[in-house]
Amino acid sequence: MIEISVNGRTQSVDAEPDTPLLWVLRDWLGMTGTKYGCGIAQCGACSVLVDGQAMRSCQVPVESVAGQQILTIEAMADHPVGKKVVEAWVAAQAPQCGYCQSGQVIAATGMLLQTPKPTEDDIAGAMTNLCRCGTYLDIAAAVKRAAETA
Amino acid sequence: MNSITRPSLPPGGIANLSRRGLLGAAGIGTLLLGFGLPTAARAQKGPPMSRHATAVAAYLQIRPDGTIRLLSPFVEGGQGIATSSAQIIAEELDADPAQFVVECAPAGAEYQIMFGDQVRFTGGSFSTRASYTTFRKLGATARAMLVQAAAQRWGVPTAEVTTSPGRVLHAASSRSLGYGELAEAAAKLPVPADASLKDAAQFRVIGKPTPRLDVRAKSTGAAKYGIDSAAPGMLQAAIAHAPRLGQEPATLGNEAAVRAMPGVHSVHRLPGAVAVLADRWWRARQAVEALEIGWTGGTLPEDFSSASQLAGFKAAAGGAAQVAETRGDLEAGMRGAAKVVEAEYDAPYLAHAQLEPPSALAVFAADGTLDLTMPNQAPEMYREVAAKLAGLQPGQVRIHSPLLGGFFGRHFLYDTANVFPQAIALAKAVGRPVKVIWSREEEFRRDAYRPLSYTKLRAGLDAQGMPVALQAVAVGEGPLGRHMAGFLANPKVDDSVVEGLTEKPYGIAHHRVDYVHSKQPVNIGFWRSVAHSMNDFFYESFLDELAVTAGRDPFEYRMALLAGSPRHATLLKAAAELSGGWQRGPYDAADGTKRARGCAMASPFGSEVATIAEVSLKDGEVVVHHLWVAIDPGQIVNPAIVAAQVRSAAAIGLSSALLEEVVFEKGEPQALNFDAYPILPPARMPQISVRIVESGAPMGGVGEPGTPGVPPAVANAVAALTGQRIRSLPLAKARLGTT
Ligand code: FES
Ligand code: FES
């Protein structure tokens, strides 16, 4: 059994220690807001916050985050910064198919937690998740809006 | 799929076109269904209306709290169809679109509202065009029933009853009732056939940038996709596909050891694949990857490669051709020409690379009936095949169509590219619900790829350098002929190979498009904008070559050729205006870069598009700074959705122009994930400006038309900047340098 803290709740899971956090969230805990896109840290659909840092959970062995605070997309609407990001996302009408957007919202929240007043370069450095629907311009508008209100 | 944009076809029913033994090994026996749509009667004029347009109960449920549940014929995958459908219905129903909850309807005849009520699918940029009048009628009919119910309750003539959004009013007595309060009574009334539609001048919702209904759920992780579905007692399956198409599993070296791995339930041989079932998908995946599988056979030859396929098309180009479209007398035109220009173009296989890996959940109920949840663009077509595979009647199969995590043409019936036959076979084998998820790698191995294609072009120019004759010879095979042959307008010409070469707006007196059918052993599918995705690149690049040969500006050259087509001339001018006035360049930009611009036209899916691209070079790589896209879909429902779709379509078009290529070597696709198959990253996204021109022409599509103009506009800009003509995509293959 491994104990992890997800969205403020301690959870015990019987997963093998090297199981990626992504699959622990999705399959063991039934939290499907975090998405699987590539499994090799290329797309960012699986992003979660670990102690306030955005990480690609498909590459995070669950044992490595025991004792750390994991926040997922499901917690963002009630998170002080996450909620502003979510509102900015809605206002900018950023999602299309939406599949990448959990990861995009997490990436933006993680960036604003680290860098409340991001420069263009900060944004370019943090917002690297892929979107096959090509919503990058709408995401950029949403990030700007969130940065102004955060 | 332009061939099915215009005709409205008489009932033909489903025809089982061919039965291939590909999946026979485990008794799945996949069926390729084609829809027998006789092409003789293509007469219907005006916007189509389904006879189901008054089937209010099948589509709309007005709940006591006033929310309105719409069972939509169409699947939402980011194109905004849920919202625009709600808008159209809300307009006539007199309701607020924000009150709508939209779900994709189950398989059923009352949702088959396309082509004379024979089929439905979500694709071909068809949904809004195919349903516009039907949905208006549906909304108007529902409103009439609510008005009638209120009049009866109040004992007043219906003529005195009016509505405001979501409410029925009787002004004389100052009474009003919410739709939710009347819904039950209204549902009991006979359905009127004669509810009249609004005058377009009175529109209050159609034409407005109504916010999309699903963005909050998609911004909070609440939106559910097929991959998220679950059932009590479900096992999860991970798959190892044969490396080469058509290979079958021969030996399993370490099956006992794999069975003993954590969580593993069982190991199964499937046609062309091996599956491991486990309690969690990750455990199944670990196990299937640990299996030592020996493969045998293979329909895709061992020496097959993309290069050999292209060589094969080139060799076939001189063979017997079908005339796909002809005007004037090509050979006479060529004989009279002052100069003849020739060129060959090709474009690679592409992966759909939708971000949601495909999945299917199969659940057999106690009574033997089947629930299937999976991404799909055509519920009845899936149901038909699923029923055969499960040994059931179609009515015993329930299809659930969740939100699509992107589709771009990925989720039609594609034989070996479909997941659900595996889910059905496995659920049957173990007597429990089974969800199959294809890993990204297994998806890239078995996608139905955008076909590799090759076209020869030849033009005769007059003394002024204007084209008097032009011939295109398209060689290859398309997804329409492969998977839905019943849709072909002319069975001898695969429109999903030639569209984009045909139906050009330019005033070229002698014009002929020939089609040489040449099969390819790779599985192929519809990819955003289908054959336009390569053909508009071929044709518009070639036209640019002609302008350069003539020593004329490519924009002016096109304008001259569009003299007889005011709709297109207006649009190209609109794109130029949007870009601040046409200039080809090269010129020095404020940031010190040297830039140039290219333009292109396209006529996809009933819409018209003009695109201008601005590029520079950095370290031999193309930097696209700005795309300006003017689109004329005739008329629109939601300008914000149209603009978002154009940006999205342009982005994928740019991705294909710059980066994408599925390369086969030794019978296997080389790239199996995004590391080796890059798609457009945020860092390479240009600015995109969109202008919507509503010419009032019949409504065209908007989901795909933004795609095909981008590759030629970019390639033409590169030619303007460097003098180098790109005739083979993607641009990443080319070594570029400023002249
Ligand atoms: S799924 Fe983790 S980065 Fe793609
Ligand atoms: S919104 Fe579809 S992948 Fe980003």
Image: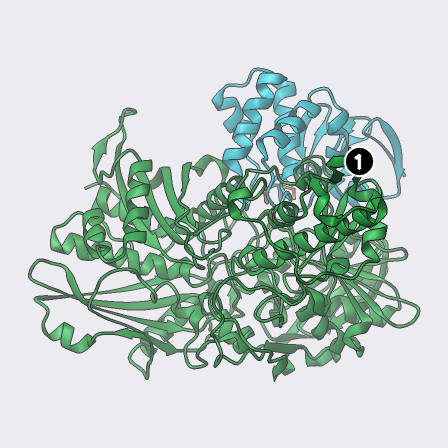
Residue B556 versus residue A124: which sits nearer the camera? Answer: B556
Image label count = 1
x, y (%) of residue B143?
Answer: 71, 50
Residue at position x 72%, y 19% in the image: A80
Residue B452 versus residue B474: which sits nearer the camera? Answer: B474
Residue B138 quadrant: bottom right
x, y (%) of residue B473?
Answer: 30, 72
- Relative height, residue B339 to residue B580 (above, below): below
Q: Is residue B582 left or right of residue B147?
A: left
| Apparent colour of chain B | green
Q: Is residue B255 left or right of residue A146?
A: right
Residue at position x 69%, y 21% in the image: A81
**Residue hosting label 1:** B175
Q: Quadrant of the C terminus of chain A?
A: top right
Report whether residue B300 is seen.
no
Chain painted cyan: A
